[in-house]
Amino acid sequence: MASSNENNPGVIGPGNFHEGIRAGKISTGISQGRRALSNIDWNVIGDPYPSAITKRGLTEKHAIRAKNPPIPVHRPITRNFAAQMSNKQQLKPEVTKKQVHSVPTTSGLDDSAIVVDDDDYETMDDFSAPMYVQHAEAMLEEIDRMDEVEMEDVDDEPVLDINSSDKKNALAAVEYIEDLYQFYKKSEWSSRVPPNYMDHQLDINDRMRGILIDWLIEVHYKFELMEETLYLTVNLIDRFLSVQQITRKKLQLVGATAMLLACKYEEVSVPVVDDLIIISDHAYSRKEVLDMEKMMVNTLQFNMSVPTTYVFMRRFLKAAESDKNLELLAFFLIELCLVEYQMLEYPPSLLAAAAVYTAQCAITRTQQWSKTCELHTSYSEDQLLGCARAMVGLHQKCGTGKLAGVHRKYNTSKLGYTARTEPANFILNSRF
């Protein structure tokens, strides 16, 4: 074999041994024009690509590449290189071997030319990932699976955009509506009265207050006044009585005057003083009405702009996508609460939300409170349940006592005989 190489100048011999190195093996079939890809001291770093060498015929394409071979890019030696090299099972990357044809050399030998194709240099990781990296990847995959399971369990109930229908209505003030109700929620506490203010009254009690408001509800209905007027009237009475001592003889005068002030604030066409004197059976003179009006506005410091239950009721009914039946039943429950002194312990927004919730339960015969209602009322179902139970109790006994003005009002065809609706008694036995 050695003698053949000496007689054949096209074969690599001992004199040009360094040109015969090709990927860690000696090439015996490359002409003098071929050269190695690089000169690497394999005794130092070993053979990192033992299976990356392929045998291929010397075609025209490969002959051109052999003249200008691509420069291989080697990974830098890291601190853990020696430890990684010790484990040969992890050092051998999986590569694809390509079948090549043998090309006879000038010596007539049937040895195959050993050529390294640049297609074999593919992007790959030379070594396996360290254990801590594998653990981190496994942990991340587990977290992703847990997130997918949690997302499947989430309730997909949509939250409705209740302002979408009013975007073209300038009077709806869609741009400011959320800020307005946030302000109402804050200011309702400053306009509330102590739920035990009757303890400071010497000549009147909560029973007399109930009779007065029950009578004003009928007056309001006969005069066909706006709904806002009734709620503001009750608010003015409670705020006034919470700071001013009144005799029972003047209590009806306080109620009539409060309605007059509310009409001036809310109504377009205000009833005249003489009309109020007539409905009071001429118990008071014109001068007494005007004097009481002055006393009330000064006591209340002319503060008439307060968020009443009606303000919240309209917003919450919209969130509940109410129909006429739900609206009438909710207002029926609220007016029952106006008469009851004990319901002063609940803020206006809570009363409105509980009325909508209780009305829904009475109509559907199931307990339901949507995500949209919870978002816009800021009350969850369990927060409403205490007030809702009190409303069911009022609903059960309405029309049975002397204070039946609300029942008579809503037991008419004009208001859909709403008072005949069966109460949501099952709420009283709720687990919440």
Image: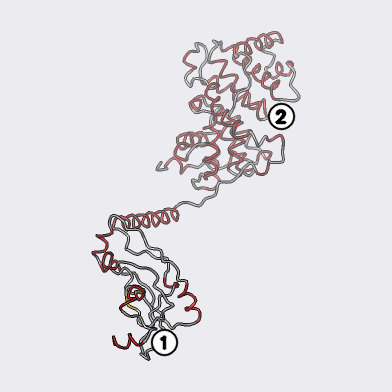
Q: Which mark is residue 300?
A: none
Which residue carries the number 1 mark? 103
As measured in the structure, the alpha-carbon distance from the residue carrying label 2 to the one carrying label 1 is 111 Å
Relative image position of residue 270 (x, y in whole percent): 74, 22
Identify whether 253 is placed above or below 135.
Answer: above
Which residue is at a point 65% across and 44% down the rendered structure image? 164
The C terminus is located in which quarter?
top left
**164 or 76: which is nearer to us?**
76
| Quarter occupied by the N terminus | bottom left
Choose top left, top right, bottom left or bottom right for residue 79. bottom left
Q: Secondary structure at mark 1?
A: loop
- Neighbor class of circle 1 (other Cα within 10 Å; few <14, some 14-19, many 20+) is some
Q: Which residue is mark 2?
A: 224
Q: Mark 2 belongs to which amino acid?
A: Glu
Left or right? Give the position of 418 relative to 157: right
Most distant residue in the bottom direction: 108
Indicate whether 351 appears above or below 11: above
Q: Amino acid at mark 1?
A: Val
Q: Residue at x 47, y 51 (%)?
A: 155
Q: Where residue 179 sits in the image (x, y, percent)?
A: 59, 32
Q: Quadrant of residue 174?
A: top right
Q: Is residue 307 above or below residue 110?
A: above
